[in-house]
Image (spheres, grey):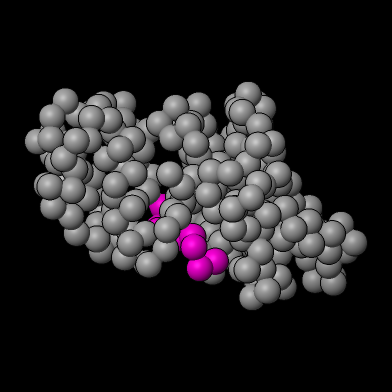
Amino acid sequence: MTRPIFIVGCPRSGTTLLRDLLRSHPNLTLPPESQLIPRFYRAYGDPSSDREAWLRARRILHNPRIASWGISTSEAEFAGCRSFSRVIRRLFEVWAAKEGKPRWGDKTPHYVRHLPLILRLFPEAQVIHIIRDGRDAALSWIRAGFEPRNLYVAARMWNDWVAKGRRDGALLPPGTYLSYATKLCWPSRRPPCGACATSSTSITSRLFSLPIRSSTNRAGESVSGATPLSAAASSARTRAVGDQP
C-alpha cells in the first residue's frame, strides 16, 4: 500500500505551490483540495454494507469540490468497503488512475487542525506542514478576500493553527510528520536574503527525499525499494516556497 501525503498549514503559506511542485513527480498526484474528510466522517461514519459505501461515495462525488475532479465510479468499485477511510481512499485511487500515477496526496490546509483524525483514518500517511512567517501569512490572508477580515484575527488564527499542527505533529510516529518554516525578507523588493536562499535549497533537499512507497524506518530515512521525489526537483528547483505570495 502506498503512503498518501497530506500537505497542511495556515492558508496563504505556500501549500498550493508545494502541491504543484510535488505533482511534477511522475509517481505522485494531488487533486484540488478535498476539504471534507473530517466533516463527512463525523457526519456519516463508516458504512455497514456495500450499499451504504456506495451512497457515501455518491454523496461525496456530488460535493462541488470533488465534482470538479471529473472522476466517475460505479457501485461495484466500493464492494467490501467497510470504513470511511476506504471509501475516501478509493476515490483518490480513481483520481490517481486517471492521472496515470500510483501515489496520491491531498493539499487541504485546514487539515492541520485535524491531524489526529487524519492519521487515524490513514495511519500510513505522511504529513508535510508548511509554516510561513506569521506576518506575511496574515497580510496575504486578509488580502485574499476571504475570512478573516482583519489583521488581528488573521494573526491569532495563524498562531492557533501553527501551534496545534506542531503540537499534534510532535505526537505522530517517526517518519510521519515533516514541518518546514519559511523565512520572511523585508523589504519585498530586495533580492532574496541569505535566509531565504537557504530555505529554497533546504526545502528541496528535504521534501524530495520523501519515499513513494511505505518504506521509511525513521524520519526522513528511506530504505531499499523507495523511489525518492528528487526527479521533480530539476524542473522546480528555482521555485521557493518562501517566495510564494
Is 245 situated left or right of 28 in this image? right
Q: Give the magenta range.
A: 25-33
Residue under the image location 33 percent in, 62 percent down: 97
Horizontal and vertical percent position of residue 220:
70, 44
Q: How many marks?
A: 0
Q: Nearer the viewer, residue 161 or 177?
A: 177
Horizontal and vertical percent position of residue 120:
44, 27
Residue under the image location 68 percent in, 54 percent down: 209
Residue under the image location 67 percent in, 68 percent down: 233
Horizontal and vertical percent position of residue 234:
68, 74
Q: Is residue 184 above or below residue 232?
A: above
For the C terminus, the quadrant is: bottom right
Residue 129 included in the magenta stretch of the image: no
Q: Is residue 3 above or below residue 172?
A: below
- The quadrant in which residue 219 appears is top right
Residue 194 in view in this figure: yes
Q: Nearer the viewer, residue 71 or 103?
A: 103
Q: Residue pushed farthest right? A: 194
